[in-house]
């Protein structure tokens, strides 16, 4: 088992809470993530581990289109940590919630799938202090339900979890095709942002249809995430062509909404 405690805890905070990670591509960066990868088998079944590593790879591929290279460490960290409590029982999730003073809503308790995002995010600062970056924690926290005004990092982790190459569920395969078959690398920044929004809306539509078919409650954050993406699309459709070009100059900054 990897000794995660040997990873240095949160270092200098640079801008009101942003975590100081090693440079993407540095030896320190590789060592940090390798330790986390080695730690995962004690938490996850082999099948889940394959999924998590596939999400990491997909997140990096998406990041090349939407984020600067230095964000790779956050993408990899969030991808590796997003399912660390996925195999907990409901009782264990509730135990973690109690420990951290979190009160799950009735909908979250009735839809235990939503609990693992809450408990995984809660555990990161104590169990993986070197990766306890606020952006990483938020990406883990919202990777299941989504939320209104998701950051680019949150969107990419949400989508990577949906379309990673280990997914064979027909709707996931279809969504993966919808994203990549459109050749987003050939698009200009504005088109690429809009493409991501459309694919994410489709992913929320699939989720909502599934929840309705299964008679499950709909988490308000999921409705809010879909609504906010639709409003974003409509706002962009109403902008003049010149305004769109202006908005495309700085694509995919972390923390901004695409
Ligand atoms: Fe996942």
Image (cartoon, helix red, strand yellow):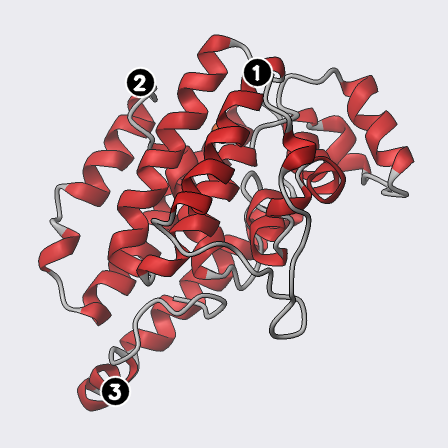
* Residue at the spot 33% in from the left edge and 30% down from the top edge: 164
Query: Residue 151, image x and y in percent?
Result: 49, 61
Residue 52 in the figure: left or right of residue 145: left
The answer to whether 211 is drawn above or below residue 195 in the figure is above
Query: Height in image: 3 above or below 60?
Result: above
* Spot occupied by residue 242 in the image (x, y as percentages of width and height): 19, 90
**Distance from Cα at disc 2 to Cα at disc 1:** 19 Å
- Label 2 or label 3, whichever comes before in sequence order: 2
Which residue occupies 66% across, 30% down?
116
**Quick one: label 2 or label 1, which is nearer the N terminus?**
1
Crowd band around label 2 with a 10 angstrom C-alpha radius: few (<14), some (14–19), many (20+): few
Q: Quadrant of residue 219?
A: top right
Q: Quadrant of the C terminus?
A: bottom left
Label 1 or label 3, whichever comes before in sequence order: 1
Q: Is residue 160 or residue 33 the one in the foreground? A: 33
Q: Would you name the residue on which mark 3 appears? A: 246
Q: Residue at x 47, y 18 (%)?
A: 49
Where disc 1 sits, the SS reads loop
- Label 2, secondary structure: give it: loop
Q: Return the residue at label 2.
A: 168
Query: Is 237 placed above or below 144 here?
Result: below
Secondary structure of the residue carrying tag 3 is helix
Reply above or below: 128 against 15.
Answer: above
**Viewer-side label of 2, 1:** 1
Residue 175 in percent (x, y) is at: 28, 36
> How far apart are labels 2 and 3 at the CA level?
39 Å
Q: Which numbered dot is residue 44?
A: 1
- The percent position of residue 117, horizontal first and vertical second, equals 64, 36
- Point out which mark residue 213 bears: none
């Amino acid at each position: 088992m990897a000794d995660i405690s040997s990873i240095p805890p949160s270092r200098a905070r640079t801008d009101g809470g942003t975590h100081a990670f090693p440079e993407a591509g540095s030896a320190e960066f590789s060592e940090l993530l390798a330790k986390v990868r080695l730690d995962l088998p004690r938490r996850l079944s082999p099948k889940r581990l394959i999924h998590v590593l596939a999400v990491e790879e997909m997140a990096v591929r998406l990041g090349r289109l939407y984020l600067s290279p230095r964000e790779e460490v956050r993408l990899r960290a969030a991808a590796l940590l997003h399912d660390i409590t996925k195999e907990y029982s409901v009782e264990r999730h509730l135990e973690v919630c109690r420990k951290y003073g979190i009160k799950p809503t009735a909908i979250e308790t009735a839809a235990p799938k939503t609990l693992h995002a809450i408990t995984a995010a809660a555990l990161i600062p104590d169990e993986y202090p070197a990766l306890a970056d606020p952006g990483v924690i938020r990406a883990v926290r919202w990777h299941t339900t989504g939320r209104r005004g998701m950051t680019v990092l949150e969107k990419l982790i949400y989508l990577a979890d949906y379309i990673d190459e280990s997914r064979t569920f027909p709707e996931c395969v279809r969504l993966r095709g919808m994203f990549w078959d459109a050749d987003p690398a050939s698009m200009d920044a504005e088109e690429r942002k809009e493409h991501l929004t459309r694919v994410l809306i489709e992913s929320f539509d699939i989720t909502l249809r599934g929840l309705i078919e299964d008679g499950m409650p709909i988490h308000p954050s999921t409705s809010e995430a879909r609504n906010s993406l639709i409003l974003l699309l409509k706002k962009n459709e109403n902008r003049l062509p010149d305004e769109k070009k202006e908005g495309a100059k700085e694509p995919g900054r972390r923390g901004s909404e695409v």
